[in-house]
Image (cartoon, helix red, strand yellow):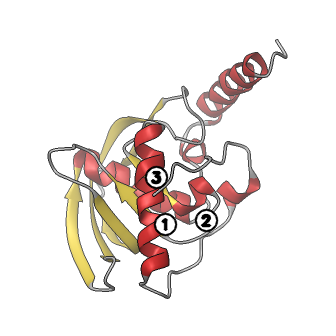
Amino acid sequence: MAIRAIVTHPDPRLRRRAAEVESFDADLARLVGDLLDTMRAAPGVGITGPHIGEMKRVVVLELDPADGVRVHVNPVVLSTSEETSRHVEGSVSMPGIVEEVERPARMRVAWYDLEGRRHEAEAAGFPATCLQHEIDQLDGIFWLDRLSRLKRERAMKRWDKMRRRATGGG
């Protein structure tokens, strides 16, 4: 497996809907391995195909090393609660920038594993937030889109300033 380059905001690939995975094969397993290695190196707790420029509907999560790695291929949100919760979110595509985001507190999700078997489960709290965040990314919805205009503009200014500093531009 390999650590791959992460696509950074505002790359247009982060705004495109990822394609359904059709082949549950060795190439998919390699992609998942690369996603896991890249996420751990970033570091992060979740990553998708689009984060490394692979426009495939694949999510890798490792919310707690004790719980292990979770792979969701072609995930679909089946339902969400009316109740909401707030969690601090960020992105491996925008390292160093975080903001509090409000999302449904609970959800039901369906997905396929690496062997192509379908699963359904409920998620609540932080796991629900992470799944919704990554599924949004697969749909071309960057996490900043879930912020108020003021918070989004403030986050973008911080990001632009960090990028200018990193490239010696200010």
Q: Secondary structure at mark 2?
A: loop
> Whole-percent x and y of residue 159?
67, 27
Label 1 packing within 10 angstroms: few (<14), some (14-19), many (20+): many
Q: Quadrant of the N terminus?
A: bottom left
Q: Which mark is residue 93?
A: none
Decide which of 17, 92 is in the foreground and name it.
92
Q: Secondary structure at mark 3?
A: strand
Q: Is 82 situated left or right of 144 in this image? A: left
Q: Which residue is mark 3?
A: 47
Residue at the spot 21% in from the left edge and 44% down from the top edge: 65
> Whole-percent x and y of residue 29?
41, 72
How many angstroms separate mark 2 from mark 1 (CA)?
8 Å
Q: Secondary structure at mark 1?
A: helix
Residue at the spot 73% in from the left edge and 44% down from the top edge: 10
Q: Is 83 situated left or right of 165 in this image? A: left
> From the viewer's perspective, is the residue at label 1 or at label 3 nearer?
1
Residue furthest to the front: 1
Instruction: Tell me if residue 22 comes above or below residue 19 in the rendering.
Output: below
Label 2 packing within 10 angstroms: few (<14), some (14-19), many (20+): some
Residue at the spot 65% in from the left edge and 59% down from the top edge: 53
Decide which of 9, 89 is in the foreground and name it.
9
Q: Which residue is mark 2?
A: 54
Q: Which residue is mark 1?
A: 31
Q: Earlier in the sequence, mark 2 or mark 1?
A: 1
Decide which of 93, 114 is in the foreground and name it.
114
Is there CB contact under 8 Å for labels 2 and 1?
Answer: yes
Q: Earlier in the sequence, mark 1 or mark 3?
A: 1
| Tag 1: amino acid | Leu
Residue at the spot 44% in from the left edge and 46% down from the top edge: 39
Q: Earlier in the sequence, mark 3 or mark 2?
A: 3
| Tag 3: amino acid | Ile
